[in-house]
Amino acid sequence: MSGHSKWSQIKRQKGANDAKRGALFTKLAREIITAARQGGGDVDANYRLRMAVDKAKANSMPAENIKRAIERATGAGADAEQYEEITYEGIGPANVALIVAAMTDNRNRTASDIRSAFNKAGGTLSTVAWQFEQQGVISVPLNGRDPDEITLAAIDAGASDVSSPDAGAIVVTTQPNELETVRRALADAGYEADSAELSMEPTTLVEISDEKTARQVLEFVERLEDLDDVQNVYANFDIPADLMEQLEASVA
């Protein structure tokens, strides 16, 4: 599992302050709205919507907010919200490759914000998608259970790989079209996931071993993630576990 994926796990576990949580809820609502507009408001019939709702619940988004987002997407009227999905690619500090997934109602604003962030970090927008592949990623909390049992259950369900980036969770990767099948099989076996989503996982990694460079990379990723229109940032850096532990305290 890449260093950025480990960092994401740490942030999810530590939570966020109220200001960042409000921004996160806005991003989650956009994903729900887009999914509902594309496939309808029935969670059982719309797989993308169900994933968006599950992600919102995993991040403690109130049920009323989720319901309101679906209603805003499926209701009639000129004020129904629509967002365009755009992906940007580039190179950041330490030659780290990044894919930035955005959802916006103003393409020019979003492009300007992302280009500015790359320029300030000494990076550049360029094609890097060949260094990533789409995979399903499922995080299953251990909650005192035997990790070997969860690993075997995941393998039996058809997982591509299983890893343990920290002591508290098992991370299961799948083929994109197998994500729901594996998640459901784990749930049926008694292993409920705290997140299940499609992700762009790196096929090549940039090893980062010094603290200064690691902080530069992580701060850049967080600046991108804090942009209003950015939904997800995928990166191919890899930071050793001991160094990552030193950086945990800097998570907002």
Image (cartoon, rainbow, N blue to C red):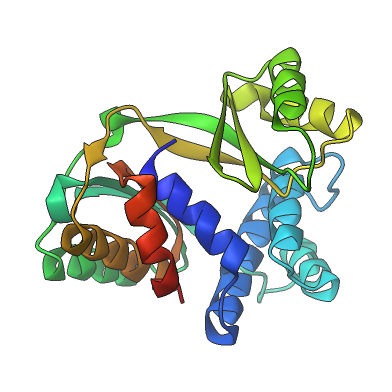
Residue that protrudes farthest toward the left in the picture: 122
Q: In the picture, residue 14 is in which quadrant?
A: bottom right
Residue nearest the viewer, comparing 222 with 36: 222
Compared to residue 235, the image places residue 183 above or below, namely above
The spot of residue 22 in percent (x, y) is: 60, 80
* 198 on left or right of 54: left
Q: Residue at x 19, y 70 (%)?
A: 116
Compared to residue 190, the image places residue 219 above or below, namely below
Q: Residue at x 24, y 58 (%)?
A: 214
- Mark yes or no: residue 79 visible: yes
* 93 on left or right of 8: left
- Mark yes or no: residue 124 visible: no
Residue that protrudes farthest toward the bottom in the picture: 19
* 196 on left or right of 161: right
The spot of residue 163 in percent (x, y) is: 55, 31
Q: In the picture, residue 192 is in which quadrant?
A: top right
Q: Residue at x 88, y 28 (%)?
A: 189
Q: In the picture, residue 246 is in which quadrant?
A: bottom left
**In the rendered image, which quarter contains the N terminus?**
top left
Residue nearest the viewer, comparing 112 with 139: 139
Compared to residue 219, the image places residue 127 above or below, namely above
Q: Residue at x 9, y 62 (%)?
A: 122
The spot of residue 94 in percent (x, y) is: 14, 51
* 132 on left or right of 120: right
